[in-house]
Image: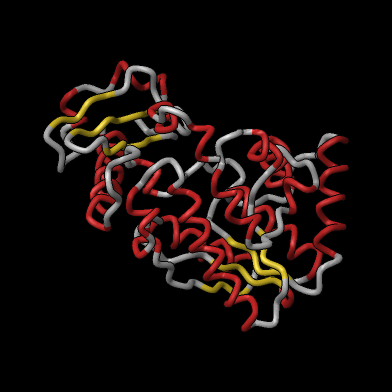
Amino acid sequence: MSEVLASTTAERVAVLHADLAGLPAVLVAFSGGVDSGVVLAAAVRALGVDRVVAATAVSPSLPAAEREAAHAFALDLGVRHEQPVTHELARPGYVANDGARCFSCKAELLDTLGPLAARLGIAAVATGTNADDRLAGFRPGIRAAAERGARTPLADAGMTKADVRAAARAWGLALADKPAAACLSSRIAYGVPVSAERLARVEAAEVALRGALAAAGLPVRDLRVRDLGDRARVEVDAALVPRVGPELLAAVRGWDDVELDPRGFRSGSMNELLPDPVRYR
């Protein structure tokens, strides 16, 4: 069901529309999430489907289900959907997995999408960075994108995460209430090398645990399996923590030990393990 936008949000959406309408065309880095999904939908509303292209990276760090959902969303909007292969694992900084891993990841994405946009005759590449992201303090990926000239229409319009979700609901977008779904590499503890095998293990573990919870009548919104090296730490919605016992955690395989975080899901919880996040900005 659509909703009427609050006046402040409506004003920001108007700024977003005007910004995008001033472009000849745009390629949107579409991860499948609500932020870049709103940028994509807003671009279609401002420019029409023929002047908008969506691009979703094919990478071991993006779950197959997320890529399939992104493709379905782009098709529903009627836009061209490119799926270029990215090679994050060829970047030493990404594999080393220090606090600046996201810089290497975003650099690889934009270094792939920039030439793709050029081949399509498109000068502007836009990401889903919102105004809240700019205030978060620890976002090395934003710096990598900025250095490569990526546009950030949501942030430039002052749109917060709440504004983004409100716009998505007002426009009847299927991903309006979709939970945040950071890339799989964000599940691997800093200092533990990223590999295709580790990414696949995390993806399989999350799919298996989500299925086990559903079978037990415990549908979960936010779920993460964090790879801490020789053990895994599971985060689920805080309200579900008391109901997740060893029999359900047994669905998570591939580690010597599996533990449940009693605090529940927290976005960006791996950053808590960094000794000095400031130096990675």
Of 14 and 23, the residue lying toward us: 23
Q: Is residue 30 above or below residue 117?
A: above
Q: Which part of the image, by quadrant, shows the N terminus?
A: top right
Q: Position of residue 156 (x, y in %)?
A: 78, 48
Name the quarter where the C terminus is drawn.
Answer: top right
Residue pushed farthest front?
279
Q: Residue at x 38, y 18 (%)?
A: 263
Residue 78 shown left or right of residue 246 in the figure: right
Which residue is outermost to the left?
A: 256
Which picture quadrant has residue 235? Answer: top left
Horizontal arrangement in the rendering, residue 88 relative to residue 55 (left or right): left
Residue at the spot x=78%, y=62% of the render? 45
Q: Position of residue 238 (x, y in %)?
A: 41, 21
Closer-to-camera residue (112/41): 112
* Residue depicted at x 35% and y 65%: 90
- For residue 189, which quarter of the picture? top left
In the rendered structure, the answer to whether residue 271 lies left or right of residue 148 reads: left
Residue positioned 33% across, 54% down in the render: 95
